[in-house]
Amino acid sequence: MSTSAGGLIIRQEEPRNLEFPFDRLDSYLTPVESFYIRSHFHAPTIQPDSYRLTMDGAVKNPFAITLKELKSLPGKTIVATLECAGNSRVFLVPQRPGAQWELGAVGNAEWTGVPLATLLDRAGLNRNAREVVLEGADRGLPAELPRPPEAISYSRSVPLDKALDDVLVAYAMNGSDLPQDHGFPVRAIVPGHYGMASVKWLTHVRVLEEQFQGYWQTIDYGFWDEVGGIPVRRPLSEMRIKSEIARPSTFEVLPKGRTYTIYGAAWCGTGDVVSVELTTDGGRSWANAKFLDPIRPHGWRRWNYDWEIPDRPGRFTLKSRAKNTVGESQPDEFNERYFSYVVNHTLPIEVVVQ
Amino acid sequence: MSTSAGGLIIRQEEPRNLEFPFDRLDSYLTPVESFYIRSHFHAPTIQPDSYRLTMDGAVKNPFAITLKELKSLPGKTIVATLECAGNSRVFLVPQRPGAQWELGAVGNAEWTGVPLATLLDRAGLNRNAREVVLEGADRGLPAELPRPPEAISYSRSVPLDKALDDVLVAYAMNGSDLPQDHGFPVRAIVPGHYGMASVKWLTHVRVLEEQFQGYWQTIDYGFWDEVGGIPVRRPLSEMRIKSEIARPSTFEVLPKGRTYTIYGAAWCGTGDVVSVELTTDGGRSWANAKFLDPIRPHGWRRWNYDWEIPDRPGRFTLKSRAKNTVGESQPDEFNERYFSYVVNHTLPIEVVVQ
C-alpha cells in the first residue's frame, strides 16, 4: 500500500475524468492531487482578473462581482464530501453506459468561500423566487439524446431553501486556490448533494420562478420517482447513505489465521452516519466497525474493523453497511430506477485467503 | 386519384402505426377508416361493461365512473384536427429516428363526449391543483433511454386551465363508437394540441399539485426552450401552424400549359388560419389560395389554388404557407430545437411538367 498523493486512474482522457484509487485512502481530508475529477467538457481557462460572477433572474438588483470583491466578503470554511452520482457504476450487472468508476469517485475536502445566501441577499429575491440555477463556463454538446441542438454550458439548479441554507460559492480547496480541474477560480459547493450539483467554473447564478428543466436534471442526472403510480422524472440531489471498503481491495491475497484491519469510509447526504457494520460471511452475520473520525456535518467518517481471518484457505466476500441518524441503511440490492447512478447498495469485495 | 376510404400506409405493424395517404384528401371530416393511427403499445382490449374511469389525486371526492354513467352526462360534440407531433418527419435531413411519416399523420374528425371540466367539477379540485394527468390503459417499456425500469402506461398531462377549458372525454368519433385503435371505449381529445395529448384508452385522470414529469413529456415529446439563455426541456403542446399540399404529390407528372388545381389543408393550435399562399417558383412569388371550408375552432380548412402550369417541361417545386389570426406563419426552415417533431416549415413538393 502506497500513501503518496496523486496517482489517479484515468477513466476518460478528455474531458478529464480521473479517479482516486480508493485503496490509498489514508487521511480525513483528501489531498487536492488525489481528489477525483469529473468534467463534462474541456476545462475552461479563466483569467482571475477578468472573472465575473453574474447574479440575475428573479431578483431586484442583478449584479456582477469580481473575484477580488468576492474574496473580500465574509468567508466561511466547511468540510464536505463530494461523491459522483455515478461512483461504483462498475459494480452494476449488466454493465451500464458511462465512466466505469470503481470506488474512488469520492473525496472529502475543506472548502472556503462565500455563502450563496450572502449574494442572493444582496441581489434581493423576488417574492416568487423558487429555484437557483448554477451555470458554469464549461460548454459543449451533451452526449446523449434528447439533447439541445447546439453547445450548452453545464448548469444545475438547487431549490431556493437549499441555496439559502448552506450552498457555498467556493474559491479555495484545502486552504489553496482551486486547481483548474476543480473549477478555478470559483465553484459551487452544495453540501450533501451528489457532486454534479457543485458546479465548477461558476460564472452565472440565475434565480427562477419556475422549476428548472435543464439537460443535467431531466435527461442526465435524473431518476424515476412516481406519483400516484405513474413514473415521473426528478433530478438527483442528496447523496444516499454509503460505506466503502478501501482495504483490502478486490482479489487481495490475505494470510489465513491472522488479523487484518479492514478499513474504509462512510457518508450520507442527510443526517449523520452512526454505524458501519461488516460481514465476511456473505451477509449471515454482521459486526460493528469502529469510527476513526467524529461526526461532522457533510464530512465522511473513516472506520475500521479487525477481522480474524479464518484458518483455512478460500475466497471470502466482504461487505460493509452504514446507517445514519435519519433511518437510512444501505440496501442489499441496486435500485433500478436510478439506472446507472446512486450505486449505494452493499458492494461485494472478494478476497483470497491463503 | 382514388377517393375510397381506408387504404392506410403501414409505418409500423405492431404497435400499429398507420398513415392516411394524404393525396386522397377529399372531405372535411376524415372518415374513421382513413384516420391515421398512432399507438405506443399494443392496443388494449377493454370490455365496455367493466370499463371505469377513475378520477383521483388532488381532489376532494375521488370517484370512478362507468361508461354508461359517462354517456348519461350532458354531452358535447366538437370538431378537432389531430396531428401527430412527428408528422412529416420524413422531410428532415439528415433523417431522424422515429416513424417516417409523410403528410398523412393528421386527420379532422367530429368527437362526442363529456367535458373533462364536468368530471373535475364533480371531483372537486383542491386549492393547489395545477395539472391534470391523463393515463391510458396501454402499457409497455418505452424505446428510448433514459426510461423507467419497468413497463409503464401511456400518460400525458395538460395544464389545469386547459383541462377546464375544452378537453373532452370522448366516446364517439364521427358519430360512432371509437374504433379500438382510436381508444375504445374512451379517449381524451385535447383540441389544438398535438395528437400525443389526446390519450387513448383513457382510464385514469389524476390531478396534481406539481408539474408532471412523465416520460412522454420530458424524454419523448419534449423540446428545448430556454430561460435566460439556458436550455430547458418543455413538453410539446399546441400544434404550430401548418399547411400541406395533398395534390399533386411528389414526382407527379403534370401536363404543360394546362391549369391544375393544387389542393390541400391547413390548421393550427391557437387562433384561426386566415390565409394560405402558394409558390411554384421556389419562393420568389407567392399567390393566395381559396378556402373551401369556413373557420371552425380547432378544425382544419381545406383550400385550393388554380396553377397555370408553364408551357415548358421541367421540374417545379411547390410549397404552401399558412398564416393565422395570432400572427403565426409557417417558417422557411425546420427549427432544430424540436429535433424530430413540429415539422411545420414550408414543405417542398417536387413535380414533373411534361
Image (cartoon, coloured by chain):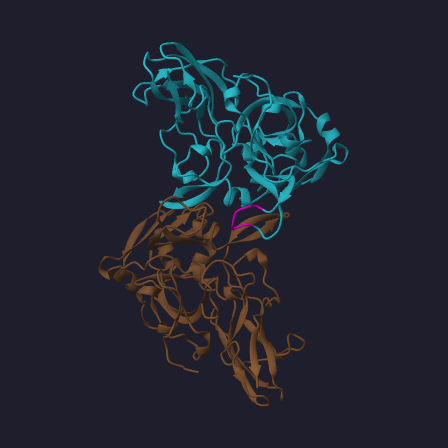
Chain colours: A brown, B cyan
Hey, which quadrant is residue B50 in on the image? top right
In the current view of this chain or complex, which residue is farthest to the right?
B49
Is residue B212 shown to the viewer in this render? no
Q: Position of residue A316 (x, y in %)?
A: 60, 79
Q: Which residues are magenta?
A: B142-147
In the current view of this chain or complex, which residue is farthest to the top?
B258
- How many numbered marks, from 0 up? 0
Tell me what residue is drawn at x 59 percent, y 66 percent. Answer: A328
| Magenta-colored stretch includes residue B146 | yes
Tell me what residue is drawn at x 30 percent, y 58 percent. Answer: A44
Q: Position of residue B195 (x, y in %)?
A: 54, 32
In this rendering, the answer to whether A126 lies above or below B268 is below
Is residue A41 shown to the viewer in this render? yes
| Near-viewer residue (A219 or A62) | A219
Hey, which quadrant is residue B181 in on the image? top right
In this rendering, the answer to whether A136 lies above or below B345 is below
In the current view of this chain or complex, which residue is farthest to the left?
A49
| Near-viewer residue (A226 or A168) | A226
Q: Position of residue B23 (x, y in %)?
A: 50, 21
Q: Majority secondary structure of the magenta segment?
A: loop
Q: Position of residue B122 (x, y in %)?
A: 68, 33
Tell me what residue is drawn at x 56 percent, y 39 percent. Answer: B157
Tell me what residue is drawn at x 32 percent, y 14 percent. Answer: B312
